[in-house]
Amino acid sequence: MQRRALVAAIATAGFARPAPAQGVPAEIRMIVPFAAGGATDLLARRLQPVLEPRGHRLVVENLPGGGSMVGMSRVAQSRPDGRTLGMGSSGLIGQIVANEIPLRFEQFAPLVRVAMDPLVIVTGGASRFARFDQAVAEMRAGPGPSMGAAGPRGTIGHLRLAGIAGQVGGQFTYVGYPGASRVATELIGGHLDLAIVKPNDVFGQIRSGALRVLAVVEEERLRQLPEVPTVVELGLRAHPFGLLTQMTFVNAPAGLPAELRAGLLSLLREAVLSPEYQARSHDDGYIADGLAGDALDAAIAETATAIRTAQQKVTS
C-alpha cells in the first residue's frame, strides 16, 4: 500500500504545475495597444505557451487606438504590482518625443526587449522595380515613386525613407497607412510603388512571391534573406540620423518594487531566449535578443535621441 502511494505521489509530482517565479503573479495581463493579428499582437501571444509551463498564465488584451496611446495609457495608470504589463514600441517612443500624446517615459518601467526588427524595402511581385538602384534613379529624376509605411509622417518608417531620399538627392511621395497589412495590400494591388516594412509583418507575402524585397535598410544582410543586399552595400548609410531601432519591448507601470522588477526581468528574459521563442524569431525575420534592464533603458534613450534628430532635420 505504501509503495503504491509513493508511486502515485511521484507520478502526480511529474505532472504538477511549476510554481510561479518568486514574487511574480501567476496571472499576468499583457496589453497590446494594437489590433489582434498584427505583428505586436503575435509577439505577445508567442509568449503565452512559453510562460505557461513556467507557472504563469499570460492573458493578452488588445486595446488599439491613438497609435498605441489608448493601450499604453492603461498600462501607465495600472498598479505597479506586476499584474498588468504592456507592449511598448518605437512608435510609442516617437509619439512621446514628438509630444503627440500625454504620456512620458517616466510613467513606464521597461523590462525586456522581445523583438528588434530590421527594416526592408519591398515592392509588389509584379512591380516595375527589380532592383533598388532602379528606385533610386526614379527618386533622383523626380517627382519620384510613391513610398509608404505603417504610420504617419514623422514615425520611423517615414524618417528612414526620408533619410534615404536625402542621401541620394531624390524625392518621393509618402503614404502612411494604419498598419502593415494595408501596406502589403496596396503594394500587391499596384496602388503603391514601394514601402519600408518589418519582415515580421509580411514574411508570408515575401515567401509566396507576392512581395519582392529590394534592399535591407540595415548594416548587415538578414540571415533569412541572404541574397538581398543592404543599402550600405549600395553606397548609402543605414542610419544617417543616428540609430533608429525598430523594436518592441515589455513595459510595466513605473514604481515596480525592486524585487518584483527583478523577478519579471528574469522570467521574461528566460522566455524570450527560450528555444521555442528563438525558433519563431528566426522563421519570421526578427531578432529576439532579450535586452533588459539598464541596457534596454539605454537603447530606448538612444532611439529617442535619433528620432528627435531625424524629426528636426526632416521637418526643418
Image (cartoon, helix red, strand yellow):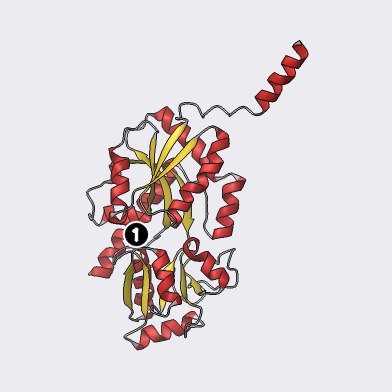
Q: Nearer the viewer, residue 15 or 123?
A: 15
Name the quarter where the N terminus is drawn. top right
**Residue furthest bottom as drawn:** 141
- Can residue 58 be seen here? The reply is yes
Identity of the residue drawn at 45% across and 33% down: 27
In the rendered image, residue 271, in percent from the top left (x then y), is placed at: 54, 42
Q: Is residue 59 above or below residue 66?
A: above
Name the quarter where the C terminus is drawn. bottom left
Residue 232 left/right relative to 275 = left
Q: Nearer the viewer, residue 45 or 247?
A: 45
In the rendered image, residue 261, in percent from the top left (x then y), is placed at: 42, 33
In the rendered image, residue 185, in percent from the top left (x then y), is placed at: 42, 72
Within the image, what quadrant is residue 109 found in?
A: top left
Mark 1 lies on a secondary structure that is: helix
Q: Nearer the viewer, residue 10 or 264?
A: 10
Q: Is residue 62 above or below residue 53?
A: below
Q: Is residue 308 above or below residue 289?
A: below
- Can residue 239 be seen here? The reply is no
Which residue is under mark 1? 306
Amino acid of disc 1: Ala
